[in-house]
């Protein structure tokens, strides 16, 4: 692989790489605002300037400048190396690039930073981006000086509602155009553009339109400053109080890799954001997936139920036992859930096949929904591929153990003869048809409250970490399956998740797909 030198270090690069992309791949950060690895190059912020030595025998590119001469007490014409934007300059073999080691680059970064802040309102105390803002970080790393301009800064519109999910503050905007390029290139909806020139430039929504495509929250995510804020997250939390778990989005079968940010003091999740994984979601997530973190708190089943009424766990289990006592295995069916992890389903599979002895196996999940050619899959379940081997059979049963609250997939079993069912025990994290019709309900954890593995539409088993503590009486579904099994008289109780995973080998979660970053 060809290489070039960056501050004396050999950097390998591929054909078509720019300096910044090759450095980024090696984990070296060249400061940048407008460059994003998933978007086209705009080269408009000039924060990534580097010094490039000419090939041997060629003259360096120089720039005439005016410099203040103290002795002459006047400006004099002098020269300095012409710096190049690392985000635009193609990497070439044996190129000698100076980034951290060039005093000219350090000066340029400081000046670009000061320029970008000339008209900036510096409302960090009330800005949602504070704590993860590049203007803050780069000021500290590359500028560190007080503002010299004493004039009134240019004022521009604030609190502009771009659409149902995004609010724009033109004074904070550095016009990097990431949001414009994201909408046009990735969301395939060129709904944003620039208006005006120079320090009057602002981002606007196309006349007659709203920013309302399916990836609007990504515009806020790619914004390197606090100019775009999400109506959902705005003014809700300070990011330095949040902790993060590496999760998998359960919004559809794509299985986008995500970060779930939560407040550990209240165990409240606040946002979902993409975790880069080139093999699955690259750098992106859809709005539906980013907002799906709310399912951790909304519509939950937080306490056991017996005969439709809130009950203790003991009462719910006693009801299950009473309903299932002496029932022949031919009359029992089991419903797996494409919403739940492989571990949860495997525990139920073990109970069904090894202990209950039933072969009447169904898979339920959410109904099909919107799809696109970007990320969104029509299958709105994160683990259909993981449970598909438990193929449904079509035979009517009188007794059912169900995982998950959803009806699709189990409808043929339950819809018509439901009233005739003599026993329905549901293990579910949320309210739903299978919960409302159950004789006993055991409240289960959501994906954010329990570790688990989900197999996406491409067959990749991906691990999702536990973020928050279980709410209410919820417990991991695999644990509830064991508790239920024990109540029904079978020694199925798994003590730990690793016991379930061990039993799952060789199809274990250990064969997880390449992890994102
Ligand atoms: S709103 Fe953010 S992403 Fe868009 S141009 Fe301004 S600074 Fe860049
Ligand atoms: S495409 Fe699917 S997996 Fe990805 S963020 Fe959206 S809902 Fe979640
Ligand atoms: S990153 Fe903005 S000019 Fe290179």
Image (cartoon, helix red, strand yellow):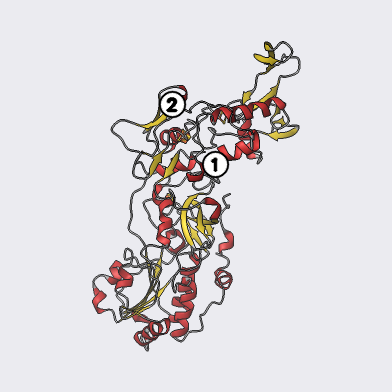
Residue wearing tag 1: 133
- Residue 82 percent location from the top left of the image: 65, 19
Q: In the drawing, what numbered circle is on residue 102?
A: none
The residue at label 2 has a CB less than 8 Å from ligand 1: no
Q: Disc 2 and disc 1: Cα gap in Å?
A: 21 Å
- Give yes or no for contact between labels 2 and 1 (Cβ–Cβ under 8 Å): no
Q: Nearer the viewer, residue 334 or 419?
A: 419
Disc nearer the start of the sequence (2/1): 1
- Residue 26 percent location from the top left of the image: 66, 40
Q: With 131 as the anchor, is 68 left or right in this view? A: right
Q: Is residue 510 above or below residue 179?
A: below
- Residue 373 seen anywhere in this rendered image of the structure: no
Q: Nearer the viewer, residue 322 or 98?
A: 98
Q: Residue at 55% x, 46% y: name it.
A: 131
Q: With 410 as the anchor, is 284 left or right in this view? A: right
- Residue 442 percent location from the top left of the image: 40, 76
Q: Is residue 61 above or below residue 147?
A: above
Regarding mark 1 in the picture, which secondary structure is present there?
loop
Label 1 environment density (alpha carbons within 10 Å; few <14, some 14–19, many ≥20): some
Q: Residue at 40% x, 60% y: name it.
A: 295
Residue 84 lies in quadrant? top right
Regarding mark 2 in the picture, which secondary structure is present there?
loop
Figure quadrant of the N terminus: top right
Residue wearing tag 2: 201
Q: With 83 as the anchor, is 353 left or right in this view? A: left
Q: Is residue 240 above or below residue 4?
A: below
Residue farthest bottom in this picture: 326
Q: Nearer the viewer, residue 214 or 372?
A: 214
Label 2 environment density (alpha carbons within 10 Å; few <14, some 14–19, many ≥20): some
Q: Count the labels in the image.
A: 2
- Residue 107 seen anywhere in this rendered image of the structure: yes
């Amino acid at each position: 692989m060809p290489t070039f030198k960056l501050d004396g270090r050999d950097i390998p690069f591929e054909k078509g790489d720019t300096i910044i992309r090759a450095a980024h791949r090696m984990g070296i950060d060249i400061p940048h605002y407008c460059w994003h690895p998933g978007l086209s190059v705009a080269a408009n912020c000039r924060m990534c300037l580097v010094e490039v030595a000419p090939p041997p025998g060629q003259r360096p590119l120089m720039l005439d400048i005016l410099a203040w001469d103290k002795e002459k007490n006047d400006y004099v014409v002098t020269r300095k190396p012409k710096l190049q934007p690392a985000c635009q300059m193609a990497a070439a073999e044996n190129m000698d690039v100076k980034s951290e080691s060039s005093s000219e680059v350090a000066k340029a970064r400081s000046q670009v930073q000061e320029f970008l802040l000339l008209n900036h309102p510096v409302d960090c105390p009330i800005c949602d981006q504070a704590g993860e803002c590049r203007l803050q970080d780069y000021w500290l790393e590359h500028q560190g000086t007080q503002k010299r301009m004493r004039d009134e800064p240019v004022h521009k519109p604030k609190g502009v509602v771009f659409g149902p999910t995004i609010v724009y503050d033109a004074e904070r905007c550095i016009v990097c155009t990431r949001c414009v390029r994201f909408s046009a290139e990735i969301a395939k909806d060129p709904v944003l553009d620039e208006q005006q020139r120079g320090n009057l430039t602002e981002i606007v929504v196309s006349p007659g339109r709203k920013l309302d495509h399916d990836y609007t929250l990504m515009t806020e995510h790619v914004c390197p400053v606090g100019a775009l804020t999400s109506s959902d997250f705005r003014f809700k939390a300070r990011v330095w109080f949040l902790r993060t778990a590496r999760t998998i989005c359960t919004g559809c079968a794509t299985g986008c890799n995500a970060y779930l940010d939560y407040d550990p003091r209240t165990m409240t999740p606040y946002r979902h954001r993409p975790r880069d994984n080139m093999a699955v979601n690259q750098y992106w997530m859809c709005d539906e997936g980013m907002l799906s973190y709310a399912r951790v708190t909304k519509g939950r089943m937080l306490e056991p139920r017996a005969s439709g009424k809130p009950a203790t766990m003991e009462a719910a289990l006693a009801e299950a036992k009473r309903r299932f006592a002496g029932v022949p295995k031919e009359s029992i069916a089991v419903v797996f859930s494409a919403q739940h992890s492989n571990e949860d389903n495997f525990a139920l599979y073990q109970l069904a096949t090894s202990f209950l002895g039933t072969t009447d196996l169904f898979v339920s999940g959410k109904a099909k929904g919107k799809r696109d050619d970007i990320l969104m899959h029509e299958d709105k379940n994160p683990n259909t591929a993981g449970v598909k081997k438990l193929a449904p059979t079509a035979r009517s049963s009188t007794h059912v153990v169900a995982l998950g609250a959803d009806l699709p997939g189990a409808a043929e079993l339950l819809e018509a003869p439901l009233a005739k069912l003599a026993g329905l025990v549901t293990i579910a994290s949320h309210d739903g048809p299978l919960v409302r019709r159950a004789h006993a309900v055991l409240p289960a954890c959501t994906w954010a409250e329990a570790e688990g593995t989900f197999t996406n539409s491409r067959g990749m088993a991906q691990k999702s970490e536990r973020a928050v503590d279980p709410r209410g009486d919820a417990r991991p579904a695999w644990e509830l399956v064991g508790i239920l099994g024990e109540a029904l008289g079978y020694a199925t109780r798994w003590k730990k998740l690793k016991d379930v995973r061990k039993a799952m080998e060789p199809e274990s979660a250990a064969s997880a797909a390449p992890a994102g970053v």
